[in-house]
Image (spheres, helix red, strand yellow):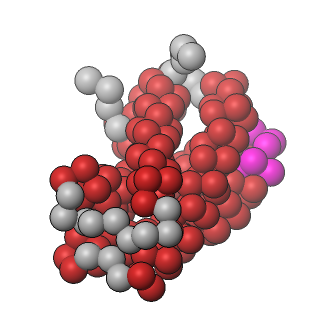
Amino acid sequence: MSFRFRISQVMHDEHMAASAMLRDVEGLLAGAGRNPPDATIAAIAATLTKAADALEGEVKDHFNFEEEALFPLLAEHGVPEIGARLTSEHRIIEPLAEQVIMGSRAALSSGFSDESWNTFRTAAADLVTNLSAHIDKEEMALLPMLEDVLDAETDMAFTDRHGNLD
């Protein structure tokens, strides 16, 4: 996919990084099944660390940037519905992300018990489902709409504010 504006590429790259993290989490869930995995195994620890770090940092920053900058811009251009819809999805995803962050950090510290694994597994599966669908909507609807309303000056300001590709 090619974009005319840099901020669209930044957002797309963030979507692809989040999708890769979700695939790793999904692989962890599938590999372990109902049995708590050993969080001291390097690959499992790496997946838990990557998930917690991404959800605490990049995903939260991404959501905040959309709500503070992109959605108001779209509303100014007569399309407030997409921002309202995606914001409501953020509110569903955020508590799932918090559960995965807390579960990942706890497992990295002291491992999974049967109970903590079941709690983590449920939240992580729900997160994978919801965040994957959310990313797909943003790729198919938000980014094309953004490309239609951006101008070079706004793109530069957004890129300076949220992320630079250089």
Residue shown at 63% from the left, 33% from the top: 139
Residue 160, percent from left and from top = 35, 36
Q: What is the quadrant of the N terminus in the image? A: top right
* Of residues 89 and 66, the one drawn nearer to the viewer in this rendering: 89
Residue 72 appearing in the image: no
- Count of number-bearing discs: 0
Residue shown at 25% from the left, 50% from the top: 43
- What is the span of residues highlighted in magenta in the rendered image? 77-83
Is the residue 156 above or below the residue 101 in the image? above
In the picture, measured across the screen, residue 118 lies left or right of residue 160, that is right
* Of residues 114 and 11, the one drawn nearer to the viewer in this rendering: 114
Is the residue 155 above or below the residue 58 in the image? above
Quick check: is 82 in the magenta stretch?
A: yes
Q: What is the quadrant of the C terminus in the image? A: top left
Residue 105, percent from left and from top = 28, 72
In the picture, measured across the screen, residue 76 lies left or right of residue 61, that is right
Is the residue 45 above or below the residue 76 in the image? below
In the picture, measured across the screen, residue 63 lies left or right of residue 55, that is right
Quick check: is 62 in the magenta stretch?
A: no
* Of residues 135 and 22, the one drawn nearer to the viewer in this rendering: 22
In the picture, measured across the screen, residue 119 lies left or right of residue 113, that is right
Residue 140, percent from left and from top = 70, 32
Residue shown at 57% from the left, 24% from the top: 151
Residue 20 appearing in the image: yes
Asked which quadrant contains residue 88, the reply is bottom right
